[in-house]
Amino acid sequence: MQSWKTLARTPALQRGKYLTVEDHTIQLPDGRTIEQWPWLITPDYVNMAVVTTDNQFLCFRQTKYAVPGISLAVVGGYLEPGENPLQAAQRELLEETGYAADTWTALGRYAVDGNRGAGVAHLFIAQQARRVADIHADDLEEQELLLLSAAQVRVALEAGEFKCLPWAAVMSLALLRLGG
Amino acid sequence: MQSWKTLARTPALQRGKYLTVEDHTIQLPDGRTIEQWPWLITPDYVNMAVVTTDNQFLCFRQTKYAVPGISLAVVGGYLEPGENPLQAAQRELLEETGYAADTWTALGRYAVDGNRGAGVAHLFIAQQARRVADIHADDLEEQELLLLSAAQVRVALEAGEFKCLPWAAVMSLALLRLGG
């Protein structure tokens, strides 16, 4: 089973650090070539399920531009230049919630779009989280911090209330890992 | 808690039916405006956890352009014009595997990128699936059909072997829904 080969890549569009589009020329294992395969370069990001010292899940209620209405959300954000995923996760947790966590478990790295790239989502569980500082979020959305039990997270997941794909992914992977 | 308003949208790039990039002018609830916010229009898609009549999960081993090496994968694909998500899911199941399923459960609709759009992922569980036809996949990747037990899916999820975000999301949501 062979991977596709990238024969050429041409810049097609750039929007600062948030989006670059390239056109790729690709060779399939059977020799066929595909021209102008659009490829998306967006920053890698982290999302995490945060469990406090008293076993509550730290979530948000918030709006998000691509989501109609209000959604449950998780802690996360883009990696900054030079950061590894765990460093980014620890920074985002502190900035967005004022919490720090003792125990970190990596839940894997996932291509956001298997065809076009669009960066990698690094997912984590942060456990033994406790309030250590004030919130210093630089996010543009209003966020309301929320503590939910595992049972409440499960009901919300089943109701589709975590309305972005990485948020539903990290919360369901975390519930499975922590024992359903 | 108020949503952002789209004041204007300008086409920035088009690549057939697979990608349109727009620049949006956005107004935040506090009155500030953001210029040239990149917005991605890609086709909505379906992904599903397929459980056969003898309680095996129908998966693939395959390559994918955005994924290094080989990945476990799930059944899915883009909605065609005029299709609703369930119709697309049933068509993709038949085309990619030759299976049909009696019982369908919607696991929700999820914005792929909460900031930039990039379409909606519609996730499903298909149960009581059985072989009814030959495979007629039009996918460009080689795929090897695979039957896994729930326990094997869980181990593979924990090892990060479903390497695309929607695949890990649908399998973990399905395991939770079906009882962990």
Image: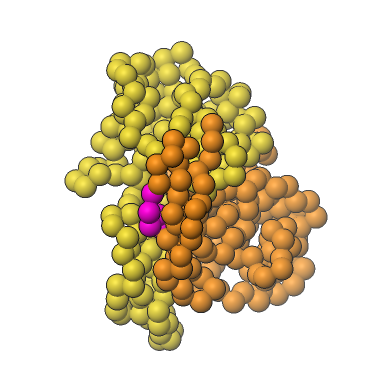
Chain colours: A orange, B yellow
Specify the quadrant of the image occupied by residue A44.
bottom right
Specify the quadrant of the image occupied by residue A35.
bottom left
Q: Count of labels shown?
A: 0
| Residue B30 horizontal side relative to residue B155, left or right | left
Which SS type dominates the magenta stretch? Answer: strand
Residue, far top = B54
Residue A85 visible (yes or no) = yes
| Residue A7 horizontal side relative to residue A101, left or right | left
- Name above or below for residue A123 compared with residue B30: above
Specify the quadrant of the image occupied by residue B153.
top right
x and y, in percent, of residue A11 in the image: 46, 68
Residue, far left = B82
x and y, in percent, of residue A47 in the image: 60, 56
Tell me what residue is drawn at x 67 percent, y 70 percent: A81
- Residue A12: say if magenta: no
Toward the viewer: B150 or A150? B150
* Quarter the N terminus of chain A occupies: top right
x and y, in percent, of residue B176 in the image: 53, 34
Residue, far right = A102
* Quarter the C terminus of chain A occupies: top right
Tell me what residue is drawn at x 42 percent, y 71 percent: A13
- Name above or below for residue B157 compared with residue A83: above
Tell me what residue is drawn at x 32 percent, y 19 percent: B134
Toward the viewer: A137 or B119? B119
Residue B174 visible (yes or no) = no
Tell me what residue is drawn at x 55 percent, y 61 percent: A60
Which residues fall within the magenta stretch? Answer: A34-38
x and y, in percent, of residue A104 in the image: 75, 51
